[in-house]
Amino acid sequence: MIISIGCDHIVTDLKNHIIEYLEAKGHKIIDNGTYDHIRTHYPIYGKKTADKVASGEADLGIVICGTGVGITTSAAKVKGIRAALVRDITTAKYAKEELNANIIGVGGRICGVGLIENIIDEFLESKYKENFENDKIIEKIDQIVEDDSQVGDEEFFAEFIEKWENGYYPKK
Ligand code: RB5
């Protein structure tokens, strides 16, 4: 399977561990960053990760930040993406089986590494239960996002990053 993955600076080491974990299982990984511990912003990596899934370049995606909330919410804004923030195995299974989630989000400061590995395994191994009701619900969810002009736009965050570098946003 080809898996797109992204994180913010809070959980870079965890993301690197997950990449090794998945590569050892034979998966091909697209690592969208971030690649170090320098303060950055989770929407950048949520979108990059989601774009690869929405375009078909990757089969599924994984996003990780401190709580998982910010990066999963960002990924879910991309057309064609159904991103689920989970912190247990049952929800990971539900997200794939019933909603055909194509991105799973976890909080690296919320869940332990072992649980995150198990959540990801469950998400990758579960199969979507295709039936009319599920198909229609998903169709409705997908219809919420009508404007796809930002999909694949590499410059989408350019102005934001420039403002950040020029001190427009307060540093935490
Ligand atoms: C740090 O930016 C932190 O807010 C982030 O990792 C995440 O917890 C957001 O949901």
Image (cartoon, rainbow, N blue to C red):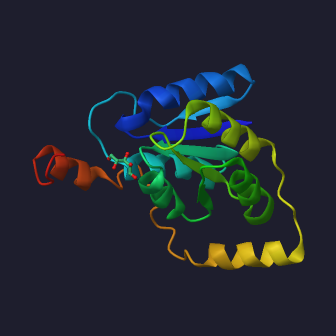
Residue 99 quadrant: bottom right
Give me the residue at 46% from left, 56% from top. 69
Q: Position of residue 49 (x, y in %)?
A: 52, 46
Frontmost residue, 29 versus 150? 29
Viewer can see residue 29: yes
In the displayed orientation, state which residue is furthest to the left: 167
Give the number of marks: 0
Give me the residue at 51% from left, 31% from top. 15
Q: Where is the N terminus found, in terms of image quarters?
A: top right
Viewer can see residue 55: no
Give me the residue at 76% from left, 53% from top. 93
Residue 95 quadrant: bottom right
In the displayed orientation, state which residue is furthest to the right: 131
Q: Position of residue 79 (x, y in %)?
A: 56, 65
Q: Tell me: residue 43, above or below residue 140.
A: above
Give me the residue at 51% from left, 68% from top. 148
Q: Position of residue 168 (x, y in %)?
A: 11, 54
Frontmost residue, 43 versus 9? 9
Q: Tell me: residue 99, above or below residue 89.
A: below
Q: Position of residue 48 (x, y in %)?
A: 47, 47
